[in-house]
Image: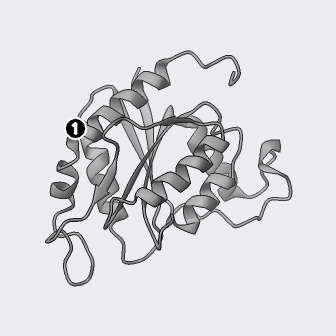
């Protein structure tokens, strides 16, 4: 049975590179016949900020968007978050999407691809701490998915000139991460997470 990987684009800006990067990553992951990719654009997956009357650990969601988000995460076997680094951190929409749920993340294989002028290293570190706190199974295969913009990658409007070519430079890391997500998704859960 194929492994469903939920690929989340973390940027909600109108002018963004995240969607094209996530689509190129998804295309690479989809080369594996054992992988089905579900693309989730946080700009289209509106999750109200603190709109739920109960703590997320209760799982008693009242808002239709939160319920839909929960179902989408539960349906995935693994998650790959694609997020930019903004001013030394990750976007608020990512934090909100993670915090809106609780038990849905527990034990789920979860990888992070960050991008930016320095590969989004600071955003990776910060969001990885949050993922660990959510008790997800953080996957970080060397050399990791820290995607750095090089000279000529961006045009005058700060848009990627060739998103597929940009991601192709990280092909081995994308494939290794996908393989590890599939492997961990098929593994028996650890006793403390079950």
Element type at mark 1: helix
Q: Which corner quadrant of the image does residue 108 belong to?
A: top right
**Left or right, 91 with reference to 159:** right
Residue sitting nearer the eye, 187 or 6: 187
- Taking the image as shown, residue 59 lies to the left or right of residue 147, namely right
Residue at the location (40% across, 26% down)?
182
Task: Classify mark 1: residues with Cα within 10 Å, few (<14), some (14-19) or many (20+).
Answer: some
> Would you name the residue on which mark 1 appears?
172
Where residue 106 appears, x then y in whole percent?
65, 34
Residue 54 at what x, y percent from top left? 85, 53
Residue at (65, 58) in percent of width and height: 65
Of 29 and 109, the residue lying toward us: 109
Q: How is the image coloured?
A: one colour
Kindly identify the residue that appears in the image at 27 percent across and 27 percent down.
33
Q: Quadrant of the N terminus?
A: top left
Question: Residue 66 occupies which quadrant of the picture?
Answer: bottom right
In this view of the protein, can residue 9 be seen by the observer? no
| Residue 22 drawn above or below residue 91 | above
Which residue, as the protein is rendered here, is positioned at the far right? 53
Q: Quadrant of the C terminus?
A: top right
- State whether residue 88 is above or below residue 178: below
13 relative to 174, above or below: below
Residue for point 47% across, 74% down = 87
- Give the side of residue 60 with respect to residue 89, left or right: right
Residue extending farthest to the bottom is 156
* Residue 42 shows in the view: yes
Residue 169: image x %, image y %?
17, 50
Q: Work out whether residue 189 or residue 54 is closer to the camera in this orientation and state it.
A: 189
Whole-percent x, y for residue 123 in the image = 48, 59
Numbered disc total: 1
């Amino acid at each position: 049975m194929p492994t469903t990987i939920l690929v989340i684009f973390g940027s909600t800006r109108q002018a963004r590179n995240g969607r094209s990067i996530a689509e190129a990553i998804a295309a690479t992951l989809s080369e594996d016949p054992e992988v089905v990719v579900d693309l989730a654009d946080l700009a289209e997956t509106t999750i109200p900020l603190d709109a739920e009357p109960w703590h997320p650990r209760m799982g008693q969601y009242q808002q239709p968007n939160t319920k839909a988000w929960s179902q989408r995460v539960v349906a995935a076997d693994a998650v790959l978050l694609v997020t930019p680094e903004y001013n030394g951190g990750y976007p608020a929409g990512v934090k909100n999407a993670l915090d809106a749920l609780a038990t849905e993340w527990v034990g789920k294989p979860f990888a992070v691809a960050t991008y930016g002028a320095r590969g989004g290293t600071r955003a990776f570190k910060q969001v990885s701490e949050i993922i660990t706190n959510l008790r997800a199974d953080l996957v970080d295969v060397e050399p990791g998915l820290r995607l750095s913009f090089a000279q000529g990658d961006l045009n005058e409007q700060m848009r990627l000139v060739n998103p597929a070519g940009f991601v192709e430079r990280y092909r081995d890391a994308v494939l290794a991460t996908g393989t590890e997500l599939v492997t961990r998704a098929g593994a028996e859960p650890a006793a403390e997470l079950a």
